């Protein structure tokens, strides 16, 4: 993260602008939600919207202000336990599956909490001695990227909650462009060899992206676009959900237990038309859009049906490069789409529509070292029983992605904007 040893006025201004921008984006994303919407927890893996708002505020209060801001008085010390997520070193936590029972503090009180901490951070950025600000800057920057992660999570979580409501409420009303265009799937060849992966040291990175290291890749081909809704409909029509030979055993058992017959949120309307529930309410399926809300198990089954496989995370990153990227992020039209201009290059479609499952388990890179202090618990302790996803989604905030970014979820997860891209060995 490379905080400056002696922050200048320009550094203070830059940090203040970044902090204000990120916090304002959370407010924009939640502006159409009422207090009742923001209190719902639809399953243990999700959290209420207002818990996301409070927890990201807790991060700045407990990890930046309390240890670094002289004379800071906490808003309410009881919040230290209520909004701690998983930091064992910072004391007890309210159980994750019970976040939805917290009717207090009220939404109004959480809004006041955010304003109180925001004002304190702005004062700290303006008044802290240079050496104090330098000591806190890395954690402050981590907190900004942490809030961006929660901005995406609060969207996927409220989508899941709304999907269970018979009224089918919309997070945003408005038009979703149905006129996307996908070229026929092509293949881009990569020679492989000894390549470097991991963060290249330019700008911010989470600890799990480091250190940069070398891996060997055999020659491979990567599909030039993600799998689309139309592609996946063909898999369903061919009996993909009825053929155990395509599935990993654990995935097949789960699909049978849960009654999976299609991606999450695919459903018929009152007139029997097949569509999908979106953040904008029910919409007809868009055949050329990337398929999303599939688990790792479904992604593997589809790849097997196609006689292909999922890429490893290193193949994916080698194709993408490790640097920062811009991607489509429209806060008023939050659903995957695809406008592809080439059938020859995968790089045009790697970022920002759906997170793409890879074949790689989420494990530490050689030489991995967690961050110091409480931030050591941020990523490393979750490196078991999860799979890596790459590329970001339509719900990922702008400026948050880079080629080395590693997302991770259990193989069964479906409520995220998760899709897939095919790969295959190149045999010459």
Image: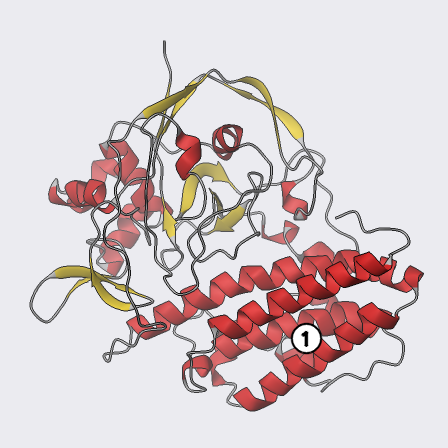
* Left or right placement of residue 419 versus residue 217 in this view: left
Residue beneath disc 1: 92
Relative vertical location of residue 423 with respect to residue 384 in this rendering, above or below: above
Residue 352 place in picture, x, y as percent: 44, 48
Residue at 71% across, 38% down: 201
Q: Is residue 50 visible?
A: yes
Residue 171 place in picture, x, y as percent: 36, 73
Task: Report helix, strand or loop for mark 1.
Answer: loop
Mark 1 Cα within 10 Å, few/some/many (few <14, many 20+)?
some
Relative vertical location of residue 335 with respect to residue 185 in this rendering, above or below: below
Residue 266 place in picture, x, y as percent: 22, 59
Residue at 85% across, 60% down: 9
Tell me the quarter of the image containing the C terminus: top left
Image quadrant where residue 375 sits:
bottom right
Residue 83 place in picture, x, y as percent: 62, 76
Q: Nearer the viewer, residue 308 or 19?
A: 19
Relative vertical location of residue 180 with respect to residue 340 in this rendering, above or below: below
* Left or right placement of residue 92 versus residue 382 in this view: right
Q: Nearer the viewer, residue 75 or 338?
A: 338
Q: Nearer the viewer, residue 423 or 366?
A: 423
Image quadrant where residue 373 sits:
bottom right
Q: Count the marks: how many?
A: 1
Residue at 60% across, 64% down: 147
**Furthest residue to the top?**
428
Give the colouring mode of the picture. Answer: secondary structure
Residue at 23% across, 33% down: 305
Relative vertical location of residue 387 with respect to residue 308 in this rendering, above or below: below
Q: Is residue 95 visible?
A: no
């Amino acid at each position: 993260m490379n905080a400056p040893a002696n922050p200048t006025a320009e550094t203070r201004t830059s940090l203040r602008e970044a902090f204000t921008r990120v916090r304002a984006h959370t407010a924009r994303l939640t502006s159409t939600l009422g207090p009742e919407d923001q209190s719902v927890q639809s399953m243990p893996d999700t959290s209420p919207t207002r818990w996301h708002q409070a927890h990201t505020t807790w991060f700045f209060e407990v990890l930046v202000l309390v240890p670094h801001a002289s004379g800071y008085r906490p808003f309410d010390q009881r919040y230290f336990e209520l909004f701690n997520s998983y930091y064992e070193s910072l004391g007890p936590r309210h159980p994750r599956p019970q976040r939805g029972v917290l009717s207090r503090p009220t939404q109004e009180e959480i809004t006041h909490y955010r304003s109180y901490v925001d004002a304190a951070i702005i004062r700290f950025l303006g008044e802290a001695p240079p050496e104090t600000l330098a000591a806190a800057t890395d954690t402050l920057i981590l907190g900004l990227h942490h809030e961006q992660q929660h901005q995406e999570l609060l969207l996927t979580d409220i989508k899941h909650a709304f999907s269970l409501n018979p009224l089918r409420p919309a997070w945003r009303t408005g038009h979703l462009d149905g006129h996307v265009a996908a070229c026929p799937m092509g293949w881009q060849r990569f020679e492989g060899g000894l390549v470097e992966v991991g963060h290249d040291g330019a700008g911010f990175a989470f600890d799990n992206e480091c250190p940069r290291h070398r891996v060997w890749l055999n020659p491979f081909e990567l599909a030039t676009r993600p799998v689309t809704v139309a592609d996946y409909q063909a898999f369903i029509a061919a009996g993909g959900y009825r053929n155990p030979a395509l599935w990993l055993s654990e995935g097949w058992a789960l699909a049978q237990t849960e009654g999976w017959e299609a991606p999450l949120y695919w459903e018929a309307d009152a007139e029997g038309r097949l569509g999908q529930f979106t953040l904008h309410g029910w919409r007809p399926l868009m055949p050329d859009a990337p398929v999303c809300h599939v688990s790792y198990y479904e992604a593997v089954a589809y790849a097997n049906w196609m006689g292909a496989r999922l890429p490893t995370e290193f193949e994916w990153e080698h194709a993408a490069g490790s640097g920062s990227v811009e991607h489509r992020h429209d806060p008023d039209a939050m659903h995957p789409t695809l406008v592809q201009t080439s059938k020859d290059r995968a790089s045009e479609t790697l970022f920002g529509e759906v997170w793409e499952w890879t074949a790689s388990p989420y494990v530490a890179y050689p030489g991995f070292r967690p961050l110091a202090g409480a931030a050591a618990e941020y990523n490393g302790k979750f490196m078991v029983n999860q799979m890596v996803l790459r590329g970001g989604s339509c719900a990922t905030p702008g400026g948050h992605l880079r080629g080395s970014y590693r997302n991770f979820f259990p193989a069964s997860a479906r409520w995220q904007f998760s899709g897939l891209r095919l790969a295959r060995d190149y045999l010459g």
